[in-house]
Amino acid sequence: APEPTYDTQVGNGGELHQTARDGGDVLTTQQGVPVADDQNTLKVGERGPHLLDDFHFREKIFHFDHERIPERVVHARGYGAHGTFTLNESLEDVTVAKVLTEVGVDTPMFVRFSTVAGNKGSADLARDVRGFAAKFYTPEGNWDIVGNNIPVFFIQDAIKFPDLIHAAKQEPDRGFPQAQTAHDNFWDFISLTPESMHMIMWIMSDRTIPRGFRFIEGFGVHTFRLINAEGKGTYVKFHFKPKLGLQSVLWNEAVKVNGADPDFHRRDLWNAIDQGDFPEWDLGVQLFDDDFADSFQFDVLDSTKLIPEEQIPVRIIGSFKLDRLVDNFFAETEQVAFCTQNVVPGIGFTNDPLLQGRNFSYLDTQLKRLGGPNFTHIPVNAPKIPVKNYQQDGHMAMRNPKGRVNYEPNSWGGPRESPTRGYRHFAAQETGRTAKVRSSTFADHYSQARQFFISQAEIEKKHIGDALTFELSKVIRVDIRETMVGHLRNIDEDLAKTVATGLGLTSMPPAAKAAVETRQDLPA
Ligand code: HEM
């Protein structure tokens, strides 16, 4: 690129002013009009008032004034890259999805990693869950896995999501903390939400202070459904496993890194891809049927539970690598819109009450965040195959129906539905009366929390105890600390004692009342 050089030139009125030397491409306005002077506004005389005639100045400032869009209501801070997925093993017995059946075919992808609670400008190494959202541009349309780096979630029903997030993010009067779990509101909500205990064990583990995005696992969390040519359903859970292995930092390192380089994770990902050191992940599935679901110790629709790999091994079916940086952070990483309801033929949902709420929430929030119903026209969101339908107009419409016809059915020609090639929903049989209820099969909140804790190595257990002690020591209200220790007693008595001692509690609080007895028979 030519070096920009500046000079003092004589204006129309004979006055001297600073402007660029000629050479290279000519700057234009949004209307394409060439710009003569981008350093000075139009004035009356040398020191006089500005003139509204300066359309270039007004357009430039107007555009700048409107640069910001709402940050994501959660997962605001994130970093993305392009990649390629390659399938090694076909799942054609259980699904018709081409992305999961056409071995050796490359599927372009976009992946965005994120923290959940922090604002857009927060630090990378906060103790937090990491989002792991993947968009596959398949030959049958876009398929998104909008996952996290932890296989379970805080809540069982989407109606609790606004409460969870309000409690986790900055408190409404003081506007802080911006990126930490260590505050009264978060632990108040958690202490009153026993279903979150399994997730709490995971987030107090080293998983929430990862070494980098290149070293995290990803999980679709919910039980989804694969559908084959006969319409038969098979339950599936999706897993991403990093080829570099799972790596974390220690809490003291996280604190130092955050201070020295709040962009540590995004810089690491950028540098790795820039240097050709492309990070890779395997895609694995846990497949199971109704018989397994009926005999499993927990409800497979409950997102606070996982299915141990000892019971259903993860079958690796392919891998992806991130091999291309974005050209523009805003255009791609900021404007990308993932949604759990973006599925392709052969992939469907289950009645997980968290998943069903998410299927509504993402489209709804993106309508506002991305300024109207046409955000699928933005290149990073558009499928890489032709889109043919009669949807039209709205803000920022880049793609309207061509010609005379904008309705269906019509006899002019144009795209039509196809019962044989189109998306078919799984033919589920449902019964029951309408009611606001939580299934009693979701009632055990401690057994898998305990199973996770006892499966940890001694040093990992120590880190969990340290993290809980540190986090709860930031909670001012002693009764909240005590309620939390009461929950820990249902998970592991030694852990509860360690935390109680660390917090300086003078006596052991009573164990929280559990709806069902915690299972002691689950293997570590
Ligand atoms: C954003 C994961 C639960 C609402 C995200 C993102 C991820 C994610 C990874 C960031 C997407 C991106 O990078 O652009 C999850 C997981 C959940 C979960 C794994 C539970 C298993 C929920 C629930 C709701 C919800 C229950 C609401 C009912 C949202 C919203 C956004 C978001 C509104 C912002 C989307 C945007 O502005 O583009 N979630 N989430 N999430 N999630 Fe979730």
Image (cartoon, rainbow, N blue to C red):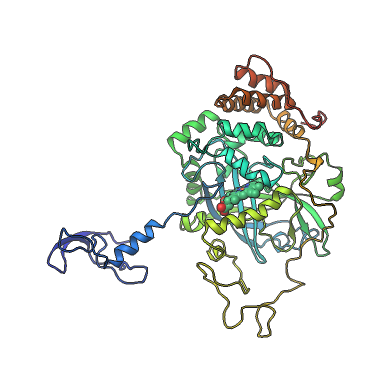
Q: Is the residue 44 above or below the residue 519 in the image?
A: below
Q: Tell me the quarter of the picture where residue 61 sits.
A: bottom left
Horizontal arrangement in the rendering, residue 133 relative to residue 440 (left or right): left
Q: Which quarter of the figure is the N terminus placed in?
A: bottom left
Count of numbered circles in the view: 0
165 and 347: which one is in front? 165
- Residue 331 appears at what percent x and percent y? 48, 59
Is 481 situated left or right of 118 in this image? Answer: right
Residue 280 visible in the shown view: no
For image coordinates 73% across by 69% down, the residue present is 422
Question: Depth check: 445 or 134 in front?
Answer: 445
Residue at position x 20%, y 63% in the image: 43
Q: Is residue 72 above or below residue 180?
A: below
Task: Measuring from the top left, give residue 200's x and y in whole percent.
Answer: 66, 34
- Seen at 49% across and 52% down, the residue is 70
Residue at the left extreme of this rendering: 14
Q: Is residue 105 visible?
A: yes
Task: Examine the image and state in which quarter residue 409 appears.
Answer: bottom right
Q: Residue furthest top?
A: 506
Q: Determine the residue positioned at 68% across, 78% down.
A: 408
Q: Position of residue 80 (x, y in %)?
A: 53, 52
Residue 487, position in %: x, y?
A: 70, 27
Quarter of the picture holding the C terminus: top right
Q: Quick one: 506 or 138, which is closer to the camera?
A: 506
Q: Nearer the viewer, residue 334 or 445?
A: 445
Q: Is residue 443 left or right of residue 71?
A: right
